[in-house]
Amino acid sequence: MKKIGVFLVSLFLTAVLMTGITGCTRGGGEKAAAGGQKPVEIRYMGTETVGGPINELFNAMLEKFQKDNPDIKVQADLLPSADLRTKITVEMAAGNPPEISSCITSYANEFMRDNKIEDWRPIIQANPEFSQWFLKKNIDSMAYRDGRIMMMPTEASIDGFYYNTEIFSKNGWQPPKTFEDLLDLTKKAKAAGITLMVTGGKDIRFAWLASALMARVAGKAKTDELTGGNAMDQWDNPQYGFVTAMTKFKQLVDAGLYPRGVLGMSSTEADQAFARGEAAMYYEGAWKGANFETAGGKEFINKLERIDWPAFTDAPDGDPSIHIGGNIWGLMIPVGLNDRVKDAVVRFAKAYCDPVYNAKLQETGSRVYAGVCDYDRTKTMKIFNQCVDAYVEAPVYMYSMDSYAVPSVDLAIKQTAMPGIVSGEFTVTQAVAEVQKAAQDYLKSKK
């Protein structure tokens, strides 16, 4: 297992290569602003990449925005999520970030700590639309530890533990309610010639599962301490739950949770395996519904149901009511913009956050809106609506690990520790030690 290297150096090299291959699109033309003043130019960095309905809706929103605001010219720099994180990190370090960007909370925390991004509180006060569109609790979820608002929430997240009702019915299985049920089902699925779960191991899709395990064994308060509080150097301390979480994970892996070769399986291949009935369950986020429909069609989608992650009855600190998700992505503005540019950025943010636009996005079954909107539930699939309901009704949210822990620790968990357990290269002790080292190295770098 390759260990985590020098994080920022690798980010820089990746971004340099990516700069030459990433396509940027410009909305609108060169129409001059009123009075002949040259349009103000802003760059938006986001994840609405080419190839799906979200990209089409984004481009339509951008085209309308350009027509309504001829004094603003928007460059859209659209990248996959992982590439965006790399590029925004390097550009922030170099002092040339986009004027507005989608960002994940763990990265925004780092930028706010270094006073590189704007506090949204004055913007919200001057633009009451944001308070009308988003509940206070959702805006407050974007608060830095000193109360500054790092971002305006946009896309909401909620976990989906999906199961194939046809497979369950055929085998006389019931959806798991406890860890013991889940472990038993893993063994039954293996005996039936299928695997219980599948995931995109090649794409390191373990961040959601890491948080689900922590929620059930340790609860939110202790995980908060590990990821950003006073216990950031305590990943190997059993009191904080990560050791138990990895122990539970190894139990499931040893029982046959994943198919052979899962670490070489892309997310697309995992979706296809799920659609073919080679796995009975899939755990990740609300957006997976659209991917499942692509892989298996409407007939397959209609077989799926969503359940909550099972409770761990032997973990008194765990909280079975926690949903992994919440407000993870938002719009971020760097400090230092002049008044005209900042005005343009806020106007773009309003168009981006508008509930009418976001209702259309929600109807694709690919994105849950972080605000309040009415969308046509008949236009999307049942499991997506179940995810939306879970987001609205969730009593407690806890972030997926990639937006929760500092980036180097998240990478140690999902690229080293958990894959090491799956491959058999690491014991639990060795896997935990990798994460502990990443945490200690991070803390040393901040002194």
Image (cartoon, rainbow, N blue to C red):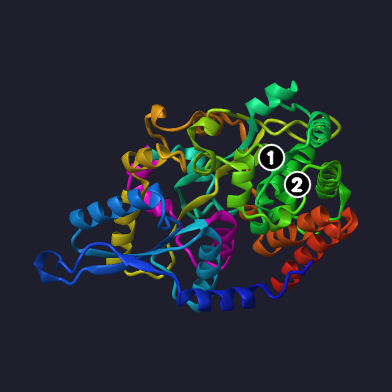
Name the spot of residue 75 as percent of width and height, x first: 33, 66
Q: Is residue 90 above or below residue 144?
A: below
Q: Is residue 428 magenta?
A: no
Q: Which residues are magenta?
A: 104-132
> What secondary structure is marked by label 2?
loop
Say which mark, if any, is on residue 259. 2
* Mark 1 lies on residue: 278
The answer, for residue 229, to whether it is visible in the render is no
Q: Is residue 52 left or right of residue 217?
A: left
Q: Is residue 122 magenta?
A: yes
Mark 2 residue crowding within 10 angstroms, few (<14) / some (14–19) / many (20+): many
Name the spot of residue 344 as percent of width and height, x first: 29, 61
Residue plotted at (42% across, 39% down): 362
Which SS type dominates the magenta stretch? Answer: helix
Residue plotted at (67% across, 54% down): 265
Q: Is residue 383 above or below residue 341?
A: above
Name the spot of residue 213 as percent of width and height, x first: 75, 42
- Residue 303 falls in which quadrant of the image? top right
Q: Is residue 212 above or below residue 402?
A: above
